[in-house]
Amino acid sequence: MVLATHNGSEFQKWACITLHKWLPSKAQQIAGARAWGAHNDWLSGIEEVPTTFTDDIRDVKTTRWGDDRWPAKLPNRATLIHALSKSEIPLDQVYFRSPLCVGISQKLALATINAIWDAKALVYVQTMDVLYKAGDDLEDFCTQLRKDIKASQNKDQRRRHPEG
C-alpha cells in the first residue's frame, strides 16, 4: 500500500468515484484524483484498485435522493467506509471531485461525510479545494451542494423542455 506523508505522519489517499448524469465523467473524476495525488494505479490500466471505489447509479430512477435506502445503491462506497473503519492509519483522506459527488442530496452527503469522519478519516472536495476533518463547519459545503443540485435540476428541466 502506498502511503502519503505530512508532517511525519503517514496516511492513505482513497478515491470515491460515482457515476451519474449530474456528475463529471469517470475519466474526469479519476484524472482529478490522480492530480490530487491519490494512488496512481489507474496509470497501469487496472480498472479496480484497492484505494479507488466506484459506484454507477446512472440507471437508478428516483426523485427521493434523501431516502435511507441510498446506501444499498452505493455498495462500493459502503465498502470504502468499512475499509476506512478497519484502517489502523489515522487521518486517511477520501477524494471526491465535487460536493455533488459526495451526495446527490444533502442528507446523503452529510451521512457520507459523517461516516467517513466516524472512521477517523478526512474528506477532500477538489472543486472547493478543501479538506474537512471531523467537527468542521459544513455550511459552505451545504450551500455549494444546494447550488449544484439546483443547477443540475435546471439543466434536466431544460433538456426535457427545450422550448422553455
Image: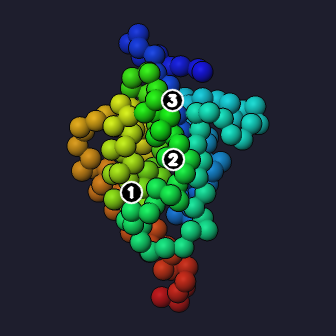
Circle 1: residue type: Leu
Q: Residues within 10 Å of mark 1 (few under 14, many from 20)?
A: some
Residue 125, quarter of the rendered image: top left
Residue name at image x 23 percent, y 37 percent = 135
Q: Position of residue 124 (x, y in %)?
A: 42, 38
Is 118 or 156 nearer to us in this picture? Answer: 118
Residue name at image x 44 percent, y 21 percent = 89
Is 153 or 78 nearer to us in this picture? Answer: 78
Residue that mark 1 sits on = 108
Q: Position of residue 35 (x, y in %)?
A: 57, 34
Q: Is residue 34 visible?
A: no
Q: Residues within 10 Å of mark 2 (few under 14, many from 20)?
A: many
Residue name at image x 53 percent, y 59 percent = 73
Q: As displayed, is residue 56 above or below residue 1? A: below
Circle 2: residue type: Arg
Question: Of the numbered discs in the image, which one, if any, rests on residue 140?
Answer: none
**Mark 2 vs mark 3, CA separation in Å:** 15 Å
The furthest residue to the right? 45
Question: Of the numbered discs in the image, which one, if any, rests on residue 77?
Answer: 2
Residue that mark 3 sits on = 13
Question: Which label's residue is closer to the chain start, 2 or 3?
Answer: 3
Circle 3: residue type: Lys
**Mark 2 vs mark 1, CA separation in Å:** 12 Å
Q: Label 1's element?
A: helix
Q: As displayed, is residue 33 above or below residue 127? A: above
Residue mark closest to the camera, 1 vs 3:
1
Q: As displayed, is residue 91 above or below residue 26? A: above
Residue mark closest to the camera, 2 vs 3:
2
Is 85 or 162 nearer to us in this picture? Answer: 85
